[in-house]
Image: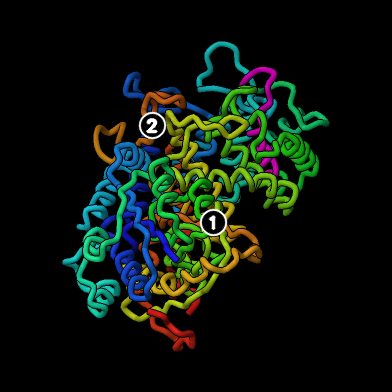
Amino acid sequence: MDIAITAGLNRARHVVILAEALRRRGVKIAGILIVSPFQTSRLKRLVRNRGWASARSAISRVLGIDGLIDRNKAEGPISEAMKSREIGETTITAWTRRHHVRTFNVSSLNDPRALDILRSLEASGVVYGGGGILGEQFLKIVNRRVISAHSGPLPAIRGMNACEWSLLLGEPPTVTIHFIDRGVDTGSIIEKLAVVVQPGDTVSVLREKCALIGVDALARRVDIFEQPYPTQPNAGKLSRQCFVLAPVLKELLEVRLANFTPRRIPKEINHS
Amino acid sequence: MLRSLEKYDHHLKVTGAWIKRSFERRHGGSCAYYSPLVGWSQLYPETTGYLIPTLLRLADYLDDQSYRDLAIEAGEWLLSIQRQEGCWNGGHHPPRGETRPSVFNSGQILQGLCSLYLDSGADHWLLSAERGAKWLSSGVEANGEWLTGHYRSGFQPSYYARVAWPMLEVATLTQDDQIKAAAERVLGWVVKRRLKNGSFSGWGFEAGAPAFTHTIAYTLRGLIESAEILDDWAWLGMPAEAALERLLRLAELSGGRLAGAFDDDWRADKSFVCVTGSAQVALCLLTLERRFPDLRLVNGAAKLIDWVCGAQWLHGPRALRGAVPGSVPFHGRYMAFRYPNWAAKFQADALLGIIERMRVELEKGKLAWT
């Protein structure tokens, strides 16, 4: 079984961990498609809609000099995992060079070039590690066999900043492994895993915890590509979609996390 | 206090000061707008009327009696220019040329008078409001339409839901069934204009033309507030939900930079932002959230409010400090090159709303599932 991986950034360390986990399981990676973030139209749209501050923040993220993927910042779950698993590469291309896996820089996962590449890979399925919304053509090429890790409990918390929203809306933090379909986080659910929140956890730490739980579960679950595609739709009414937290709500969450003390130890197994 | 709440507090104080300045030029009323090209405009009875509730809220929030004094002064001025029939004229004051009674403007003034009555208990406010509401109700036909008194002659817009709302406020305070029945007829007329895609035909200033978010929000707020007063969400609130959900989504997808106008098919005019309308849509979302608590609605409102605050002057010449433009860019289609007093009003209302909502949330303290 050959699989393909997508990524939104070359510096996406969770994708490096995912690729390494797959390699260690003996899964052949046909190729990794990395979406190039450096597009003028994207930047223009960002500045127009959200202002220069957001654009600066996005550029920092891409260059790896923001808090989330800053190698110099205090150790987070992803850094710790990379150390404990002895993964030295911090970019996808560094990892693929070492392990002789093909990478492809694309401007969009849905553009003709990306679709041609995907076709050529003849993958049994795709593990989604980021890179934007997938179009119908992309899904069709791999017979809809695309799985993703969503940082929130589905179907209750759909959309962006799912980890944060689950905390704000009173849902236990959860990572959901699911198929991707044309809806927003509406694909068939494969597995749900609890995320343990500990005193002192920040939003950034929790996002990394979710990412880590997600990639490990994805690596375990690729065998699903060899099973019949599930036909049963998920139960439950479509919940209101979540979007990026507004600053005032992000601050509210940070205050609540700072005051967090657990009342009980969760019984669920934490796969982190 | 959250940094964002401190920011909102600061913007609110600056806005409040600008609103006060809009009253300085003339005795009693608020100037419709300030323009760097022509200076302060004439007074605007309609918006002076619905500035009154905002002034009273500012008085309480800032613990500053001068805002209440200003509200009373505004009310007295409005009483002094009330027509014998009970209504008020359209347009600015003093009127130029022929005077025409205005359905919409009279409706908005009723809100101010009701607020003053509730704040003080003084009967004369309610008596004046009742006269105005009786004039309005006497003109409503069986089908819910007024035949005269329109902004555009011969065209009754769906945003008259926002006339029915204050009529119901008066009806509730006076226990007047005729005023209530007339308001219900108007609302029934509006609801019938709902289209399958959730929009309402004729919710703009002109038949067949795209509607500014300003009048879209007028329509929706009129419906949901009336739904609460009549305790009939199914009839009046539910028809507004689809439009509100769509506006929430659009606000989120645009990062708060909501398009300034939409046609009946929801085709957006993104060439400008109707800043007033964005603040009003935020208010609609916060109002909806009072009924259906969901921080996702607050999130969308916050993004709109943050965007509106970003368009506000915080420094600069006295007349501009605190001003909120009609459009961004400044030459945009809505109130080009002007800073309307109602843009400031709706921004202030939205800020008051979100500050209050977030304070409630802060008091909860803990993460909800623990």
Magenta-drawn stretch contains A133: no
- Note whether A236 is above or below A184 in the view shown: below
Question: Residue A76's image quarter?
Answer: bottom left
| Image location of residue B243, percent across then percent down | 61, 43
Question: Residue A71's image quarter?
Answer: bottom left
Q: Badge 1 is on which residue?
A: A144
Magenta-drawn stretch contains B154: yes
- For this orientation, the residue located farthest to the right is B142
Secondary structure of the residue carrying numbered label 2: strand
Question: Residue B196's image quarter?
Answer: top right
Label 1 sits on what residue type? Answer: Arg
Q: Which residue is pictured at 42% across the width and 28% down the height?
A: B33
- Note whether B308 is above or below B351 in the view shown: above
- Note whether A238 is above or below B338 in the view shown: below
Chain of residue at mark 2:
B
Q: Badge 2 is on which residue?
A: B328
Q: Main secondary structure of the magenta part?
A: helix
Secondary structure of the residue carrying numbered label 1: loop
Q: Could you tell me if residue A164 is visible in this image?
A: yes
Q: Residues within 10 Å of mark 2 (few under 14, many from 20)?
A: many
| Image location of residue B86, percent across then percent down | 67, 29
Relative placement, left or right, of B145 versus A93 is right
Q: Range of the magenta residues? A: B151-170
| Image location of residue B288, percent across then percent down | 59, 53
Q: Which residue is pictured at 16% across the width and 66% down the height?
A: A72
Label 2 sits on what residue type? Answer: Val
- Between B63 and B364, which is closer to the camera in this rendering? B364
Figure disc tally: 2
